Each structure stands twice: as C-alpha cells, then as structure tokens.
Image (cartoon, rainbow, N blue to C red):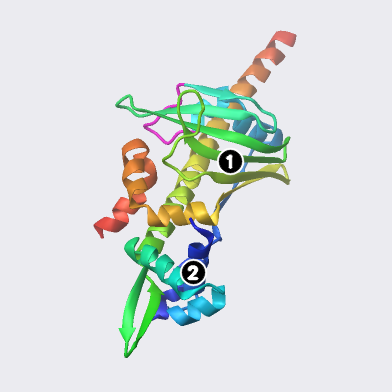
Amino acid sequence: MEPNRLHIVELLRDGPLTVGQIKERLGLQQPQVSKHLKVLSEAAIVEVEPQANRRIYQLRREPFQELEAWLHSFRRLWEERFDRLDDYLLEVQATEQHINNRSEDTNV
Amino acid sequence: MFDDYSLIPRVGEQEVIVQRHFSAPRTLLFQVFTTAEHLVRWWAPPPYTVPVCTIDLRPGGIWHYCLRSPEGHDQWARAVYREIVPPEKLVYTTTFADEHANPIEGMPEHLTTVIFMEEAGKTSVTARVQFASAAALKVALDIGIMQGMSMTWDYLVEYVQELQAR
C-alpha cells in the first residue's frame, strides 16, 4: 500500500479527522490528500460524514474486524497444531521407549 | 459514536503469539519442527495431508511442502529460513508457492519465530506470527483473498465463516 495512504489509516485510528487536519499532519497538499481519501473510500476503508460545511473522515470497522478474524484463524491454526504435536510426541516417545526396551532385552 | 475505536487493531501490530508446554526434551521438539519425516506426521490440519516436504535447513534455505485436500487439491507453501539456532530458535517467512517453490499470491508473506525453552524437564514452545503492516492491511482491504483462501485452504477461514454466519 502507498505509504501516505497507510499513514492516513494510522492517523484515523486515533479518531475522525477533517481533510484539513490530515493535510496538516502529513504535510501534504490538499489534492493529494483528497486523492488518497478517495481511494480509501472506494476500498471501503474510510467513510465520510458531512457535518455542517465540513467533511469528517473516519475508519470503517468492518475491514478491521475481518483482519482480526483472519489473524484469529492463525491463532487457532497454531493451537490445533500444538494439540497434534502433543499427540505425536507421545507416539514418538513410546516408540523410542519400545526400541530402548528391545535393545536392553538384546543386551541381556 | 466512536466508543468502539479500541476494537480496531493498530496498524503495524499485526501478530499472533501462541505458547504451549510439552513433556519432551527440547532437542526432540527442535527435531520435529525441522525434519521432513516428522513434519509430515503432524503439520497439516486434518483432513489435509503432506505428501511432499523438503527441507534445506540453513539460513536462506527453503522448506517447501504440499498440503493435499481429501479431494486431491494441492496447495503448496514455502518458508525461507532466516535464523536457525538449534535447539533454541527458528525464524522463517512463509508464502503460498507453486510446486517449484516459487512464491505465489494468495497469502501475505508472514514471519514466524519459534522459541524452544527448557523448563524443568519440559519444553515450552512459543510461536509468534507477524504480518508486516502493509501486508496485513492488504488482507483487510482485499476481500478477494478470503474467497481465495476458502477455496485453497478452507481451514483458515472456517472461523471467519462462523463469524459471518452469526
């Protein structure tokens, strides 16, 4: 993602802002900021709310909830992977024990 | 109306940490994470299997494997080792791949760090999965990836589907 666009998302993470506020904080020209906001709006990352004569931009929650759900699926993947590993280790250790017992038998 | 802002994860902090204690020596744990004959036995979420797994265990070396669905659909993945400290630490980056281990689209590249620690005869294993902020955001932006993954690795999106069904 374009770095300034990512930066806008990070700024909006702390709360809604006007185009003017975003422009100031990023040190960009208004047309550039407007262009980035248009892309982010079209991607359904931000939404705009007109207030009197100002336009307030804020993040939409849905894409971030999906991201969180996606990350959660990785957590579950690892939890279940550890479950399988636990079972597998028992199996490996039982086999090793069996081999050790057999070699002890042979030594006797 | 902005009360729920804390629910939005901060961009750049996209990571998952999972820890577990195992009643086995650390050397064995490291071995089952880095040996193909062991990995094929436990790595894949059933009913998936791992019919092919090759490992070049050195920094920059590739761990390439195939996940096969019961229907016979193959999804290849590859990891490139970044750091190997037997039997303490393993660091690698993962992406989906083709059968020749070339990276392909479908899953943003992510960094996995596995730490093995010995604790009174047991071993604690910590897996930390990190997504670069840009890559993680791409997931948030790109709804298509969800569908892509559900076709190839539906296990991972099962949870999302559950959420959507609510």
Give the vertical position of B31 relative to B147 (above or below).
above
Which chain is disc 2 placed on? A
The span shown in magenta is: B43-51
Residue B80 is left or right of residue B77, and the answer is right
Numbered circle sitting on residue B93: 1
Q: Kindly indicate the quadrant of the structure image that contains residue B154.
A: top left
Give the vertical position of A63 relative to A99 (above or below).
below
The percent coordinates of residue B150 (x first, y second) are: 32, 42
The percent coordinates of residue B135 (x first, y second) are: 50, 51
Which residue is depicted at the point 32% across and 27% down?
A: B70
Q: Kindly indicate the quadrant of the structure image that contains residue B29.
A: top right
Label 1 residue SS: strand
Which residue is depicted at the point 33% across and 24% down?
A: B72
Image quarter in which the N terminus of chain B is found: bottom left
How many numbered marks, from 0 up?
2
Which chain is disc 1 placed on? B
